[in-house]
Each structure stands twice: as C-alpha cells, then as structure tokens.
Amino acid sequence: MILPQTFVFPGITTRVVFGDGTLTQTGAEITRLGHTKALILSTAHQAADAQAMAANLGALSAGVFSEAAMHTPVNVTEAALAAYRASGATCIVALGGGSTIGLGKAIAVRTGADQIAIPTTYAGSEMTDILGETLDGQKTTRRDPAIRPETVIYDIALTLSLPASMTVTSALNAIAHGVEAIYAADGNPVLSLMSVEAMRAFRDGLPVLRTAPQDTAARAQVLYGAWLCSTALGYVSMALHHKLAHVIGGSFKTPHADTHAILLPHTAGFNAQAVPDLLAPVAEIFGGSVGGGLWDFAKANGAPLALRDLGLSQTDLDHAADIATQAPYPNPRPFDRADIRNLLAAAWEGARPD
C-alpha cells in the first residue's frame, strides 16, 4: 500500500446490522430511532415483500409506497412525499435495491426523516450520502449529510433469490465504488483497505453463486463486499467512472447496474495508466492488467460487456461525451472529449481493454 503523508478519516456514522435473518430487527431499529410509524418503500416488483413487512411490523407500519423507479425521477419523489405526509409516518424504511433506497434518500433530504435502508442487491447506495435524481432527461448528483441513512440492515437471506444476472451486475457496480475509492483525491488508507478486502470477497464469492445461487456462505461474502464498497464510496469524491455511469443512465435510461458493469473495465483501465501503483492490488486480485482483469472477471461471470447491447447508438456516444465534459470534476488522469469518446467507443463495442 502507498501510504499518504497526510489524510483525513471522517469515521463511519451509519449503524449497520449484518447477518442472516436480521430483517426481523426492523421494528426494533424503528423504535431505537425514537419513532412509532414508518412508511415502507419498494418498487412495484417488490410490493408483496413490502406488504409482508408492513404486516409483520403491525402498528409500527404507516403503509407502503411501492412506486420507486430507476434513477429516482423527481415526479415519483413528489408522489412519494405526498404519501409520506399523508401517512403520519416520521421515518422511512426502504426495502430493495438502488431505486428504492434512492427514493428514501430523496424523501429524507426534503423532510429530515430518519431512514432505515434494507438492501436486497449489492449496488451499494445504502451507506452513502449521495443522491442521484433525474429530471427532464438529465441526472444530477448531490451530497448532503441528511442523505445518509441512519441504519442499514443487511440480511443475507434477502439476497438468496436475487437472479444470477442481477447478482453479477450489482456486484460489479459495487466493485466500481471500491475502485474509485482507492484513487479518490480525498481517499485514505482505511477506505483503501476496505476496498481491496471487498474485491477479494467478490472474487471468491461471485463465481460460486453462478452455479450455486443459494450458497449462504458465498452470499455472505458478496454482501460483505458490497457493504465495504458502499462504505468506501460514501466518504470519497466520485470521479470519471460514476460521472459516465450517471450520464448514460440518466440520459438514455439504461439499467443502472448493467451500465456500471460495462463501463468499469474501461474507466478503471483508463485511470490505471495515471495511478498504476494505487491500482496494483486490483490487477493482482483479478489477474493481468487492471482493465483487462476486470473485463475477464466480468465475462467469466456472465456480465454484459457492450453498451450497444443496452440500446445505445454511436450518436448517443457523442451526446454522452458532450455531457460528461461540460463541467470539471476530480479524476486521477486528465482527459478531454476525445478521450471520453474513445473510451465510450470501446465500451460500446465491448472490446477488452489492454
């Protein structure tokens, strides 16, 4: 590890409950935070799970809002706010993936409500103070301490039925958080250690789940890796990878985790040329070069590899490059529009990075 002479570690503020069967502790966490009524959030796909939770919580439930949507559209947030205010709830329970947890954050930052996040994927939004919202085809991202959930409940049992495809793409999404934490301008050795530890957990656990999706030990490894990467991302500045993922997802409505999975080998490979020593552990864990190793790992686990498979055209790449270079943001390797256009072209084709 390359140890910086000066760094700041802000501490980890979110309470974490991790284990198998921890969903049963939701009511106790609502009470511990001083609340008597919680609105439960989910997507339409997970509405039955949210209704079951409401039934189990009994009097602690103020109802269910099951219209969370990908990329947190502002119009959905406005509908959820109306439901929250009408319900009499004083806190939020977000049960689901990044779409649902994002909606919980959007409500919290507007109302000051406490949040309990219960992730069912590995995408890793739950430990961060980051909120990405979509309005008029543009996705914007902001950070605020009020966005960070007060409690996160990780229940291994909730991930046992996660489809193989989503298991892989959300895991790669989480790995992207760890990669960017390692080279972040405001990173620190503690978060780097967490990120590298997470990648080992993903490397060892994810291939097992390809053939044995209900292997509890492997699910625990991967969920542990997701927690580590989510925590790391929550305390550093995002760089090129997340900027491109938000641009493409927000502008072209591509699936969030798939977009991250496809871009990761290309963005990591691009930045590895500027910080090879920092990213050397990534190359060691996945084999070969940083970009090539991540691409090989993604391919071996059945991940999508090409942006064109998500419906993007060559013209869309031009538009994405324009948006991505409109405002400066920290990145370890300087770039211009041509660099971004070339990177996106390789990701569009699904080419293996050198």
Image: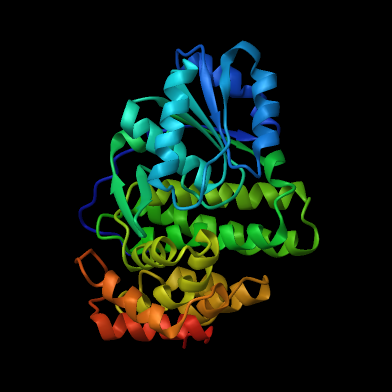
Tell which of 256 and 157 is nearer to you. 256
Residue 101 or residue 67, whichever sits in front: 67
Q: Could you tell whether 214 is left or right of 47 in the image?
A: right
Q: Which x, y percent locates residue 155?
A: 65, 37
Q: Across the whole image, how many numbered discs are drawn on residues?
A: 0
Query: Who is closer to the viewer here, 348 or 319?
Result: 319
How is the protein colored in the picture? rainbow
Residue 178, position in %: x, y?
44, 58
| Residue 310 seen in the figure | yes
For residue 328, which quarter of the picture?
bottom left
Q: Residue 199 in the image: x percent, y percent?
A: 54, 61
Residue under the image location 69 percent in, 20 percent down: 55
Most foreground residue, 346 or 282: 346
- Up-down relation of residue 56 to residue 192 (above or below): above
- Location of residue 266 (image quadrant): bottom left
Image spot of residue 5 (x, y percent)? 21, 57
Residue 290 is at least partly visible in this image: no
Q: Is residue 183 above or below residue 237?
A: below
The vertical placement of 221 against 51, above or below, is: below
Quadrant location of the N terminus in the rendered image: bottom left
Residue at 41% across, 73% down: 268
Instruction: Decide if residue 26 is on the left or right side of residue 156.
Output: left
Horizontal relation, residue 121 to residue 209: left or right: left
